[in-house]
Image (cartoon, helix red, strand yellow):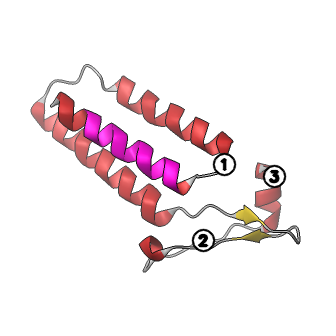
Amino acid sequence: MANEALRAYRAVLRATRKTFAGDTLMLRESAAEVRKKFEENRLVTSTADLQRLFEEAREASDFISTMIVQAKLSERGGYVVKPGKEHAGATLEIPSEEILKKAS
């Protein structure tokens, strides 16, 4: 089970590193959140609970990889969203310029 937990942890971190590449703040904050969630469940021993948590980690990894697209600030001062092949079929919600400016 420890190996499976480590694989799940690494998969979620890989997903965040790919999705938030170049965004130091999001990389740091997402890594801290992933670690916090895994630490909260460190003492879980029930096989059923562990399987549920592993499934949640797989779903989180998939969600981060396929449903989140990082907007990049363009040279003209606007934001550009470039979904990749992994986002095919996903419904993209593009935040307004106002929301993006508040987040920066």
Image check: 25 left or right of 38? right
Helix, strand or loop for disc 1: loop
Numbered label attached to residue 57: none
User: In the displayed image of the protein, which residue is found farthest to the top?
Assistant: 43
Residue 100 in percent (x, y) is at 76, 59
User: In the displayed image of the protein, which residue is found farthest to the bottom?
Assistant: 89
For the residues labelled 3 and 1, the Cα–Cα distance comes to 16 Å
Q: Nearer the viewer, mark 2 or mark 1?
A: 1
The residue lying at 72 percent from left, 63 percent from top is 72
The residue lying at 37 percent from left, 58 percent from top is 62
Residue 42 in percent (x, y) is at 29, 22
Label located before the other in sequence (2 or 1): 1
Q: Which residue is mark 2?
A: 93
Q: Nearer the viewer, residue 96 or 58?
A: 58
Q: Which residue is mark 1?
A: 23
Is the C-beta separation of discs 3 and 1 under 8 Å? no
- For mark 2, does the 10 Å Cα neighbourhood hold few (<14), some (14 to 19), or many (20 or more) residues? few
Q: Is residue 68 above or below residue 30?
A: below
Q: Is residue 8 above or below residue 32?
A: below
Helix, strand or loop for disc 2: loop
Q: Which residues are magenta?
A: 6-18
Q: Is residue 29 above or below residue 70?
A: above
Numbered label attached to residue 102: 3
Residue 60 in percent (x, y) is at 38, 51
